[in-house]
Image (cartoon, rainbow, N blue to C red):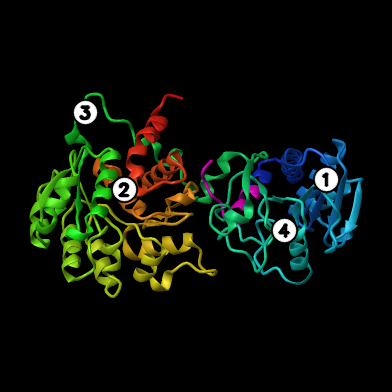
Amino acid sequence: MLELLTAKQMGAADRAAIARGTPGIELMEAAGAAVAEAAAALAPDGPILIVAGGGNNGGDGSVAARLLDEAGRDVTLMLFGNPNRLRGDAASAFSRWRGTTMPAGTDLPPASLVIDALFGAGLDRPVEGEPAALVAAMNDHPAPVLAVDVPSGLDSSTGQPWGVAVRAAATVTFFRKKPGHLLFPGRGLCGAVTLAQIGIPDDVLPPLRIATWENGPELWGRRLAPPSETGHKYQRGHTLVVSGPMSRTGAARLAAGGALRAGAGLVTVASPPDALSVNAAHLTAIMLRCVDGATDLEAVLEDQRFTATALGPGLGTGPEECELVRAALAAQQGAVLDADAVTAFEDRADTLFEWIAARTAATLLTPHEGEFRRLFPDLAPSPERSRLDAARAAAARSAATIILKGPDTVIAAPDGRAAINAKAPPWLATAGSGDVLTGIVAGLVARGLPAFPAACAAVWLHGEAAAAVGPGLIAEDLAPALRDVFSALWSPA
């Protein structure tokens, strides 16, 4: 269930389920039951306050109120709006409620839990006036908040607040998650997200043309199979990692280690002459090749046994380094460009994109947000443009698969597919961790994975390795940790 739905797609899924014979009130009853169950788990005793709006989100809250009351809980329903103006399923749900109802206001009564059922995923305008004051009152209440579908005030498609938004300790959403559950700041506002199934059949999904997913093995797992028992290293690809000069060799070695642990059969570091001795002193299973400039790199890549090239970490950003990128892209091996290989084209992005467009082999760019802004200044994420939209637009413009790194890393392909990664422990924010990711991506491309699944798998593996190491992680810990990650991934169920 990795599909991520926009508010419009979720509305279409609801309507499709109703058209197939499931009454809307049954969907609402199931949603309210899921909210009531989550509420009981969060607050096993004490009074519960439900703040409900006049739409279907408020209807879910009315159902939860009734079910909690029937279970013996002390429940107060605070309704924003005139109950006589409720319509449809929301009116039906409210009519079944027999407990205490009070008009909405900012003086919230004591409670052990506040349930936010004010606005749902379909909100498409700023929260102002009385609703904004009510959101502020929920945020100021000492009890934890359980949000219904999404925290009120949150744009479910972008993860951005519509001015103000509820800060929830937990959220219950329905059928499928939305991008705003995974994109910051939305992810932080949602708290722990529970996905509940309420009777919408999965076969409503194909007509919705889903193009966004939460990243996970179910998305790409069949592409990343264990090595064959009868295979050998030459069948698992050969990654070439281009090193910077003597004073900047560590980043390339980190990338090379990531490529080898990711399963590339062979990895070679292409080293400038002045760095040979430094790289040789640190490398064992990883091979070394003297490459003095773009002409040498072109000659090396004429050997089709190399199946992927990674360059950028510690490379440098001058004209000579740009020529190395040109040489790598002129060859027809997969190419992964990171760090300096992105920054070097800050003032000549169109040239880079022309080189990429001329290729048929996989090309991936792996910028963090600062590097992204240098290459795509007009597409940079902002409150008006989500990281999902930014990465998708950059992939279309560059003809490359984009990995926009961050706590909510977004992977986007030129054809519009995108995935949001939800597993990035905060201790990944350390020097060199991105270099290891570059290597993992290149290793998977070398093994033969297409660009988009290779990028998705690499980002997930990188996050899982960091989670396995835990606090205190340094970049050198990541590649060895992949052993246990692969063991768990490939263990029989």
In front of the other: 348 or 212: 348
53 above or below 266? below
Disc nearer the start of the sequence (4/1): 1
Q: Which label sits in the foreground, 3 or 2?
A: 2
Few, some or many residues within 10 Å of mark 4 (<14, 14–19, 20+): many
> What's the CA distance linking mark 3 and mark 4?
56 Å
Compare marks 4 and 2 and give the one earlier in the sequence.
4
Residue 11 included in the magenta stretch of the image: yes
What residue sits right under mark 4 in the picture?
Answer: 119
Of callouts 3 and 1, the N-terminal one:
1
**What residue type is disc 4 on?**
Phe
Mark 1, residue position: 65
Q: Name the amino acid type tagged 3.
A: Gly
Which residue has dot 3 on it?
231
Q: Main secondary structure of the magenta part?
A: helix
Residue at x-position 80% and y-position 55%: 51
- What type is the residue that disc 1 sits on? Ala
For the N terminus, the quadrant is: top right
81 shown above or below 76: below
Classify mark 2: helix, strand or loop.
helix
Q: Nearer the viewer, residue 124 or 426?
A: 426
Span colored in magenta: 1-15
**Whole-percent x and y of residue 181?**
58, 52
* Disc assigned to residue 339: none
